[in-house]
Image (cartoon, rainbow, N blue to C red):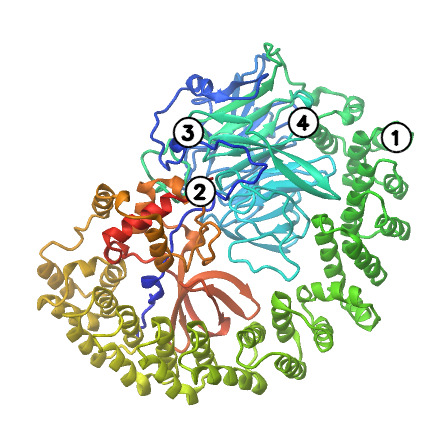
Amino acid sequence: MRQLTFLTLCLIGSFLVFTPACKNSTKEKNENEAAGESGDKFADNIRKTDFQSPEDERKGFKLPPGFEITLFASEPDINKPINMEFDEKGRLWVTNTVEYPKPAAPGKGRDRITILEDTDGDGKADKFTHFVDSLNIPIGITPVKQGAIAYSIPNVYKFIDKDGDGKSDETTKLLGPFEFMDTHGMVNNLIRSYDGWVHACHGYANHSIVAGKDGDSIDMNSGNTFRFREDGSRAEITTHGRINPFGYAFDEWGYLYSLDCHTKPIYQLIHGAQYPAQGGQEPTIGWAPIMMSYEFGSTANSGLVYYTGTQFPDEYKNNFYSGNVVTSRINRNTMRLDGSSPISKREEDFLISDDPWFRPVDLKTGPDGSIYVADFYNRIIGHYEVPKDHPGRDRTSGRIWKITYTGNKNSNKYVPKDWSKATLDELVKALNYPQLNIRMILANYIVDNYPDKAVAPVRQLLESGSADSKSFIQALWILYRLNALPDNLIEKALTHSDPMVQVHGLRVLGELKTITPKHRELAVNALNSKNPQVQRMAVEVLGHFPQFNFVQPLIALYNNTGEGDTHLKYTTLLSIRDHLKNAAIMKQVADQKWDDKQVAVIVKVLPEVPSKEAAYYALNYMQTHALKGKQLEDNLKFISRYATPADLDKLIAVTRKNVTANSDEDYKLYASVREGVLQKGIPVSASLKKWGTDIAGGILQNPQDSSYRLVQASKIAADLKLTELEPSLAKILTNKSLDSKSRITAAETLFSLSPQKNEGVITTVFNDASDSEDLRAMLSMTLGQLNSSRIFSMFESTLKNAPRKVKVNIATVLANTPEGIDYLLRALKEGNLPTDVLEELPVKDRLTSNMKSTQRQELNKLTAGKLGTENRKEIIAARLGSFDPSSVTVEQGQEVFTKNCNMCHTIGNNPGGQIGPKLSGIGTWGPNALAEKILDPNSNISDAFRTYNITLNNGKTLSGLFRRNEGAVEVFADFSGQEFSVPKADIKEKVASKYTLMPDNFRNTIAKKDFDALLKFLLSQKEK
């Protein structure tokens, strides 16, 4: 029997889909935020202004006094730049595209890596070498010996110029394939680190599983950061989460900063940390800390520089500069420290453009100390807001700008130094170069080109005592990378007078496979350093080499660290967690006696330690200590997933003993235990079933209970197959005083328990014309799963007088099979079904898929060419043409939003669903874009928000947005924003839907006045 695969949640939910990467967003500015965001012409997804020449665009830039901006390169010499990086010769390597955002067919790419040179020192590139010209949306790039490592769909490659003619003649795949379902993040911002690895960002929406030559795979879903060996031998995840990271920068302590779209703009990354992520579940220890409490007026941040050059005035040094492709600005931020933790402050924007086509997608500090800006110059930047094949997308124009501080004097000529012509001694002496990225380039060049000869002079530099901190740090890393770093020089770094050198010494320790007892002792001693950066790095190092005797000092450090030093406290929790993941250490911890403050820290991390020993320890703690809120729920889920059956019964007993029966908390705690059991993939125990039965039975005995509780009780009854509760469920269903959600959930439970037995009561309610339209519409979907001629005949007779929502859902059911289509055609022939119902996408799609040729002929005859004539653009234009904001209020619009949208979206400070993107600041989109998203939501769908139709082994169908895997279950979200788990063993088929969760029928279900009010409310949501 063929089942429906597109259920009611696609018809009654609300899902405004906006890309997280290119959305204007607004949260109220805090006191640090600069005033005066870009004006209305910067809010258009399709800019209304005209194309400008590079010179005209330059005239519209505004910079602080003393700074000037000049054109370094532009079309036709380059196309649209994405990422760029300098090499040891001072040349700028640029990935540039004509294909974006639609990938070319395999082997058909026309995109390039271009090498730009300023040979005469006049500040403008005059030599352009197309190193590779057959790529497919290349993004991340970093120069290496004889060539470059770069990403091009679908792999990371090494391109080598073996004969020195400036053209790549050898290509080696290093990593891949990476998923490229979404092309506006992918693998970007490659950067060679102190450690010699190439670090990279993994972009939005894609799910990639890749491995180095060692076969050890990494699994990345949407935002992540990772690193890989230059030869492709190994890859490792460095951080988990965030949405679309697109920008990297190191500071002199060795911290890596990353720019993100949609969470907070800039993060100082903590190795192994977990950051907020789409579909992610917050760990018990919390998300990794932020350094920035504000946003930049959009969620389209691209390219990051931490400025360490000498050219800029002091107030502009050690600043963060980042591109904002929606507001067409370069944002500037400074940073102070609370202990080891960075706290950013927003400064006045560094660059403001008058041309909304200005799209700063990448920034780099040049060898001359200027900041170079890659400008993806385009009328359209949005990836989902505008169709990818929109003719307004510029495919060939791109600029690279150079921002220089001249002190209001004319800039001098500067010919970049070609370090490839320097001797080894000159290179070693230059390791104290004041600008960090040049020091990194020099270190890379020495390692690449003098792997044997460099050891002696670099070692001599460290042993002589003449090295300043800058050169000491680079020399230390060079010897490490050349496998020539002796233990005594590591000790020298760890005992150095400069805490920054100590930190790098500890970082080197963390990269080693084993460490000596002396190094271990120095790392433990560093926990007591007066410098919090040293403490923090010592904490990280000890996490790499766990020992039981490290646990106590780590706990002490955590308890003694002030709440303001969020990064040190979080890093310490990670280190303790990593210690407890060692089974032997976990056993020793369990056998040790701890005081209450120490145990509280241990218990805080236990849900992140997947072992039965950790679960047993947590269970014992719960028997004598009271946990509350999220920590209690997380521990229940964790213990029930990893505990033995006997311990699970003990857990249930102790939990029930300490909670009021049938309270909201009782349900939440039960649900946590049930989720853990689902994740473990074991049957429900007798004690757990008894608990669930008591809760469901108790709630259902009181039909006047809250809607939330009635719904949860019905779900428990369905999950545990509590057929004895069918009479109570039937009373809920037939009680007209209750809300539709409570009643439909009861109906669905009745149907799942005994479809044939309960068909009668469900049919009776469905046939009651005086009952709720929404309820009857949803019941039609439930009954439709019977797929019987009896039900089809009833539906046909109902169509004539049914409300529209009921008509649409009945038509959706009937269109799902050729047998049902016969009933549909008869209703159409008899005038009982309006033709426009067939225009609804769920109906149209099923008719197209399921009609026989004879049925198609009959349909064409009955509709007389009317089918398919609905023009959504005309409908949108008509709504906008008659839009009358003066006739409605913002308050009325908020009511419409609450009714139709709030279940999936949050806006402002008002609580709402977390399934769709946050809509704060969405008013800057303007009425046209908003009307299109409301009235034609499936015209341009983000793959990240595509739903799945799930068919279970028992024939039941579900629909939802995939969130994550959790042990033996997959977690989805329904239209109401509620997550639900499906055992993997129960899934027969999972197919991506063509539609979003947002209903496609708002053009028919939201009246004009309500539409005007909703639009007025959304337009009022702007940055304040």
Q: Residues within 10 Å of mark 3 (few under 14, many from 20)?
A: many
Cα gap from disc 4 to disc 3, whole angstroms: 28 Å
Residue ID at (38%, 55%): 15
Cα gap from disc 1 to disc 3, whole angstroms: 54 Å
Q: What type is the residue that disc 1 sits on?
A: Gln
Residue ID at (72%, 71%): 614
Q: Residues within 10 Å of mark 4 (few under 14, many from 20)?
A: some
Q: Which residue is mark 3?
A: 356
Q: Which residue is mark 1?
A: 460
The reply to whether callout 3 and callout 2 are in contact (CB within 8 Å) is no
Using the image, tell me which numbered label, if any, was put on residue 23.
Answer: 2
Rendered position, 262 above or below 626: above
Using the image, tell me which numbered label, if any, was put on residue 317.
Answer: 4
Rendered position, 404 above or below 360: above
Rendered position, 460 above or below 674: above
Cα gap from disc 1 to disc 2, whole angstroms: 53 Å
> Which numbered disc flags the more N-terminal residue, 3 or 2?
2
Q: What type is the residue that disc 3 sits on?
A: Pro
Cα gap from disc 3 to disc 2, whole angstroms: 15 Å
Of residues 553 and 710, the one drawn nearer to the viewer in this rendering: 710
> Which numbered disc flags the more N-terminal residue, 4 or 3?
4
From the viewer's perspective, tell me whether residue 201 is left or right of residue 375: right
The reply to whether callout 1 and callout 3 are in contact (CB within 8 Å) is no
Of residues 210 and 519, the one drawn nearer to the viewer in this rendering: 519
